[in-house]
Image (cartoon, grey):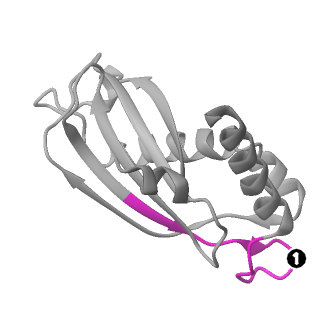
Amino acid sequence: MSQFHHKTYIEHVSRMRVRYADTDKMGIVYYGKYFEYFEVARTELLRACGLPYRTIEAAGYGLPVSEASARYYRGAKYDDELFITARIPSVAGPRLDIEYEVRINGEEEIIAEGKTTLVFVSNETGKATRPPQIYKEALERYHEHSMEHAK
């Protein structure tokens, strides 16, 4: 990835091992499971930014998925260790667009990739709302912290 890419996005890598229950009759990860893997990566990315879902909910917001897509290039198998990279823009926008890349441990090849779009919803009104201040502040803190470590 280019240096420009790293300056405009925040990313986090989650590791997980494919469970037997995640595979189909052919011994390959069932395609729908990747959306669960994306959810794990998304949750851990937000946690790494200092904003776990529980904090978002406690502040009066929900964060439902409004769109999801995936592309599959090669299937993972039982017991493969997956590295799922989740990437978000470092500046808060009206929607939370997250990109995902899935690799098998030790390999550079992307075996699957996806995108999800989430929207902040006020628990009070049930309607979509702008990203809350706690989200904007969490991104700023994370970005400042990562810039300090880059020096």
Q: Please state the horizontal and vertical placement of residue 79, each as a whole percent of the image.
A: 29, 16
Q: Is residue 35 left or right of residue 105?
A: right
Number of marks drawn: 1
Which residue type carries mark 1?
A: Glu
Dot 1: few (<14), some (14–19), or many (≥20) neighbours within 10 Å?
A: few
Q: Is residue 37 visible?
A: yes
Quadrant in which the C terminus is drawn: top right
Q: Is residue 13 left or right of residue 112?
A: right
- Residue at (43, 55) in percent of width and height: 5
Q: Is residue 31 visible?
A: no
The span picked out in magenta is 115-131
Would residue 105 be counted in the magenta stretch? no
Which quadrant of the structure image shows residue 27? top left
Q: Please state the horizontal and vertical placement of residue 127, each as a whole percent of the image.
A: 74, 83
- Residue at (53, 54) in percent of width and height: 7
Q: Main secondary structure of the magenta part?
A: loop
- Residue at (51, 47) in percent of width and height: 39
- Residue at (29, 51) in percent of width and height: 113
- Secondary element under disc 1, as helix, strand or loop, is loop
Would residue 128 be counted in the magenta stretch? yes
Q: Outermost residue, top direction? A: 79
Q: Please state the horizontal and vertical placement of residue 23, each as a whole percent of the image.
A: 25, 30
Which quadrant of the structure image shows residue 26? top left
Q: Which residue is mark 1?
A: 124
Q: Please state the horizontal and vertical placement of residue 10, each as a whole percent of the image.
A: 56, 50
